Amino acid sequence: MPVRTGYVEAQVGASSLTGAYARLEGGARLRDSLGLFAFAQATPRERMAGAGLRLTFGL
């Protein structure tokens, strides 16, 4: 049975390299060990966005 759990994470901060930044990430777990996520990040000089898969496992 698939686990359908989602999350949203928001961050603001400062970096010694890029200065202030804001980041928003959201995702959904499709199976116990597999999830999808997307993010957007902005600094005063640049904007970026991306998406990916997250695989978790135990040792």
Image (spheres, rainbow, N blue to C red):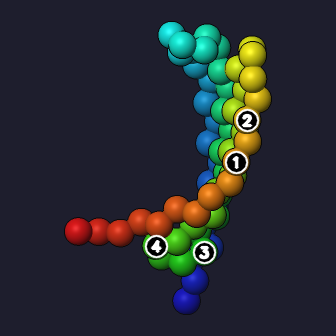
Question: Dot 4 corresponds to which residue?
Answer: 33
* Mark 4 and mark 2: Cα distance apart in space: 27 Å
Give the residue type that dot 2 points to.
Answer: Met
- Cα–Cα span, label 1 and label 3: 18 Å
State if disc 4 and disc 1 touch (CB < 8 Å).
Answer: no
Is 43 situated above or below 33? Answer: above
Residue 31: image x %, image y %? 54, 78
17 or 27: nearer the viewer: 17
Q: Are marks 1 and 2 in contact (CB under 8 Å)?
A: yes
Residue with the mark numbered 2? 48
> Which of the labelled discs sits on residue 30, or is there none?
3
Position of 50 relative to 16 (above/below): below
Indicate the quadrant where residue 46 lies: top right
28 relative to 16 in the view: left or right: right
What residue is drawn where x is 42% and y is 66%? Answer: 56
Q: Secondary structure at mark 2?
A: strand
Task: Identify the image quadrant of the C terminus.
Answer: bottom left
Mark 2 vs mark 3: which is more N-terminal? 3
**Amino acid at dot 4:** Ser
Marks 2 and 3 sit apart, C-alpha to C-alpha, by 25 Å
Amino acid bearing label 3: Leu
> Three-letter amino acid code at disc 1?
Gly
> Of tags 2 and 3, which is closer to the observer?
2
